[in-house]
Amino acid sequence: MEITRQQTLILEIDSEADVGVCRRKSVSLAGQLGFDDVKTGEVAILVSELVTNVLKHGGGKGRIVICQLQSDDNKKAIEIWCCDSGNGIPDVEKAMLDGFTGKHSLGIGLGTIRRFSDIFEINPITSEAFTSVDFNALNNYKHCIRIVKWVPESRWIGTNRNLTTGAVSHCKPGEILNGDTYLISHLSSTKTIAAIIDGLGHGKEAHLASNIIKEQILLKSDLPLDELIKYIHQAARGTRGAVIGLVFINIETSKLYFVGVGNIEGFVVSLSGKKSLISFGGILGHSIRTPHIFEFPFNKGDTVCLFSDGINTRWNVDDINWNTHPQINADFLINNYSRLNDDATVLIISYTS
């Protein structure tokens, strides 16, 4: 199979700001190549971890090369070279373990990077891939990691047409970064996963914690909910920590499953009334109890609502018309019941057809 390279991009690494720059450039190329949101999220995580490793273990300076690969049968891939001139990671085998981390890394370990990559090479300076291209910009570096990730030949594209969604999130007044985040990911035409994640406190560190967890959920959304909670708990180690409310909806079985850690509140509204979603105490990344999954019927006309503790509870569920579009209700709640001293998020999903 003949491989050609296109769109070679070389980026310098010498400060924490470069983590975001390199991530955005790689995500942009991944989207152009045809990666879906989940696989693009994997690319973002991989690049973030690689660049962070350069800053922590590679002498603080390096370069990353991002390329498009294309085979003669029209398959496409993203290729990433990340090189530095530091002393390297002292124990490569230890670094391959999940959860190996420094203070500012994501803690996913090189082992996870390897599993998310179709090709993973350490110091491939003498490989045909390296010598076949004019990578003069990398010749002065001692350590290099090469990753190749092919665009999947088949992937889910679409929405869960049975569900209508609405969500809104505001950061604490005066802050720039939001410590809350949310996700709604349609895994197929009948299965959807959604969550609100609230990083402890507010500002930069809370924002980092909640978004690391969000990215990890997107990466591992095929796991059972109890295993997913355990996975993201480990992924959040080294961060400030976060609380979460996580739901999985299966239209085929008319079921909704919920697991919560900390003080994300929520309920399911149906013709038979309101059923509260119960969370257990704990903080992802620090200490949690054994996850408990709650199961609820979820039929046409039913609605699930989640909200962070930035929304006060001085409102009555019966005063809301849940037949109204979820986005209208989410906007109403955040505009009228947000606390002034915290980030606030509302997520509403209705089974409408």
Image (spheres, rainbow, N blue to C red):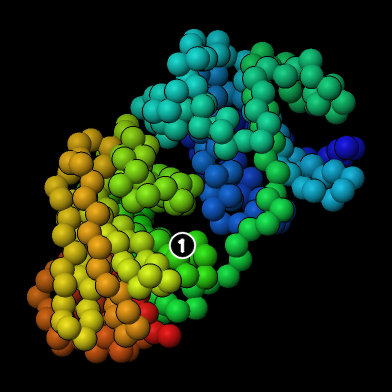
Locate residue 153, reporting x and y percent: 71, 53
78 on left or right of 285: right
Q: Is residue 171 visible?
A: no
Q: 58 or 128: which is nearer to us?
A: 128
342 on left or right of 331: left
Q: 5 or 257: which is nearer to us?
A: 257
Residue topped by disc 1: 185
Locate residue 344, reporting x and y percent: 26, 64
- Image quadrant for the C terminus? bottom left
Question: As displayed, is residue 329 above or below residue 222?
Answer: below
Q: 154 or 53: which is nearer to us?
A: 154
Residue name at image x 17 percent, y 83 percent = 272
86 on left or right of 141: left
- Image quadrant for the N terminus? top right
Question: As displayed, is residue 122 above or below residue 329?
Answer: above
Residue name at image x 67 percent, y 40 percent = 149
Locate residue 66, reporting x and y percent: 70, 38
Residue name at image x 54 percent, y 53 percent = 38
Query: In the picture, residue 88 is in which quadrant?
Result: top right
Locate residue 136, reporting x and y percent: 81, 23
Q: 147 or 292: which is nearer to us?
A: 292
